[in-house]
Amino acid sequence: MPKISRYFIKSGMLYLLCGVLVYALSEFPGSNWEIHLMPVYWHMIALGWITQIIMGVSLWMYPKGKNPAPKNGSNLSWMAYFCLNLGLIFRIGSEPFLYLNRDLSLVPFAFSIFLQFAGILCFVLEIWPRLEPQSRK
């Protein structure tokens, strides 16, 4: 298994753990949070856990084609990993505060969207060439 796949899968499991913890804290009886944690939970589960598990497994399992990727992963796949995770961290840190002080959290929130989109785009550019049909000999 390539190193990049292990990083995606392990990060996905950490987001699952943290997402469930955030959900448990936000739904704990008697808790009255001033911030909205449900969007944070959904991003941790959808992009943090599910998407990263899918990305890690697909980078591992799809054939490399004519130009095999390095054993540790290509530069594009590492860019996808760092952009997606940095974007998620900015999202987790800014989204709950959008409702309290929109001016302070709007810039990191917008930056998080840009980073997440860049991460997904890098992943698509990495995987797309691998989806060509194999030539029969």
Image (cartoon, helix red, strand yellow):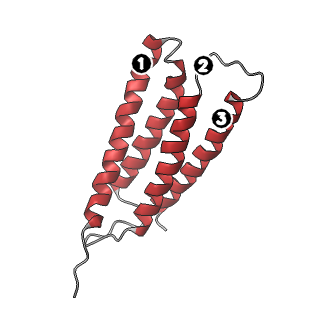
Whole-Å distance between the Cαs marked 1 and 3? 23 Å
Image: 67 above or below 12:
below
Q: Which amino acid, by three-letter code, is at mark 3?
A: Tyr
Using the rendered image of the protein, determine whether residue 72 is visible from the camera's viewpoint: no
Whole-Å distance between the Cαs marked 2 and 1? 15 Å
Q: Which mark is residue 106?
A: 1
Circle 3 packing at 10 Å, graded few (<14), some (14-19), many (20+), is: some
Q: Residue at point 54% right, 22% down?
A: 96
Which residue in the protein does label 3 denote?
23
Image: 136 above or below 126:
below
Which structural element holds mark 2? loop
Q: Is residue 27 left or right of residue 61?
A: right
Q: Residue at point 51% right, 15% down?
A: 99
Which structural element holds mark 3? helix
Mark before the other along the chain sequence, 1 or 3: 3
Which residue in the protein does label 2 denote?
35
Q: Nearer the viewer, mark 2 or mark 1?
A: 2
Residue 38 in the image, given as x and y percentages of width and height: 58, 30
Using the rendered image of the protein, determine whether residue 121 is visible from the camera's viewpoint: yes
